[in-house]
Image: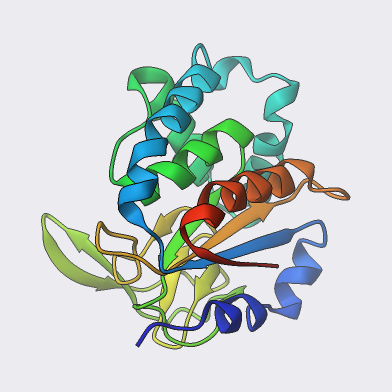
């Protein structure tokens, strides 16, 4: 049974320990249900083209003022003992791939939020609400929370490092190191019609890029889905 978009948006929790470590952080949540994927398919190419144009010429060696938010993410990763040149913030990895060979095409829904991530320079995660169990929670891992992923085409279970920032549901970790790697358990596929999106922002106090990104995501999905936002 699909989780209610209202429940998913309204019950999400950021643990106090995370808020204390990163007081400038904000998560913007958008949930969409009964998405008409075929209708989305007809509009996604233009959005991908805009993302490709946005990333043209981008280089991690010549960051500009437009990349200030990305720099903040690098600093936060380092504060948790993570080398952001080896384990990359999701938007960093996506920008690199898009600048080199265009936005990787996966499916209409994933392509939509990946394109917006590149355009607005913010990390975005997408979750299939049919596969999500209980509230979304950002917390510091104990280290025994299961994380389902794949290696060489086979399903495996890993565990986060103790003290690692993770998003979890009632079953286990849904995204490691905040926004680095998502579990395949809740990943959006071509069959997804009910989805939740987490837009991560450290850009206090106004979080303008994340909010504009959320606006754009809602404008894109509202004609073809039921939307809830927080």
Q: How many marks?
A: 0
Question: Residue pushed farthest left?
Answer: 153
In-front residue for pair 225/180: 225
Residue 196 horizontal side relative to residue 191, left or right = right
98 w.r.t. 151: above or below: above
Q: Residue at x 11, y 54 (%)?
A: 152
In the rendering, at what x and y percent does residue 195 appear? 44, 66
Question: Residue pushed farthest top?
Answer: 57
Q: Residue at x 51, y 11 (%)?
A: 57
Q: Residue at x 64, y 20 (%)?
A: 63
Q: Is residue 59 visible?
A: no
In the rendering, at what x and y percent does residue 218 appear? 60, 53
25 w.r.t. 165: above or below: above
Residue 204 horizontal side relative to residue 183, left or right = right
Write down the quadrant of residue 101 in the picture: top left
Residue 143 horizontal side relative to residue 159, left or right = right
Q: Quadrant of the C terminus?
A: bottom right
Q: Is residue 29 visible?
A: yes
Q: Quadrant of the N terminus?
A: bottom left
How is this picture coloured?
rainbow
In the rendering, at what x and y percent does residue 73 appear? 65, 44
Q: Residue at x 60, y 48 (%)?
A: 219
Write down the quadrant of residue 12 in the picture: bottom right
């Amino acid at each position: 049974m699909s989780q209610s978009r209202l429940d998913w948006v309204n019950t999400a929790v950021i643990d106090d320990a995370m808020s204390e470590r990163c007081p400038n952080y904000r998560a913007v949540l958008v949930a969409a249900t009964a998405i008409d994927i075929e209708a989305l398919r007809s509009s996604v190419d233009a959005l991908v083209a805009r993302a490709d144009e946005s990333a043209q010429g981008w280089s991690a060696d010549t960051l500009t003022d437009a990349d200030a938010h990305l720099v903040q993410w690098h600093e936060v990763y380092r504060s948790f003992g993570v080398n952001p040149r080896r384990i990359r913030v999701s938007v960093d990895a996506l920008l690199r791939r898009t600048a080199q060979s265009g936005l990787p095409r996966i499916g209409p829904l994933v392509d939509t939020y990946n394109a917006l991530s590149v355009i607005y320079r913010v990390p975005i995660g997408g979750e299939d609400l049919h596969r999500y169990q209980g509230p979304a929670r950002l917390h510091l891992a104990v280290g025994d929370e299961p994380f389902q992923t794949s290696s060489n085409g086979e399903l495996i279970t890993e565990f986060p490092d103790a003290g690692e920032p993770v998003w979890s549901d009632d079953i286990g970790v849904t995204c490691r190191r905040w926004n680095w790697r998502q579990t395949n358990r809740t990943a959006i596929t071509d069959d997804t019609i009910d989805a939740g999106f987490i837009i991560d922002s450290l850009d206090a106090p106004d979080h303008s890029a994340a909010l504009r990104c959320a606006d754009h995501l809602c404008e894109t999905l509202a004609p073809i889905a039921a939307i809830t936002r927080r």
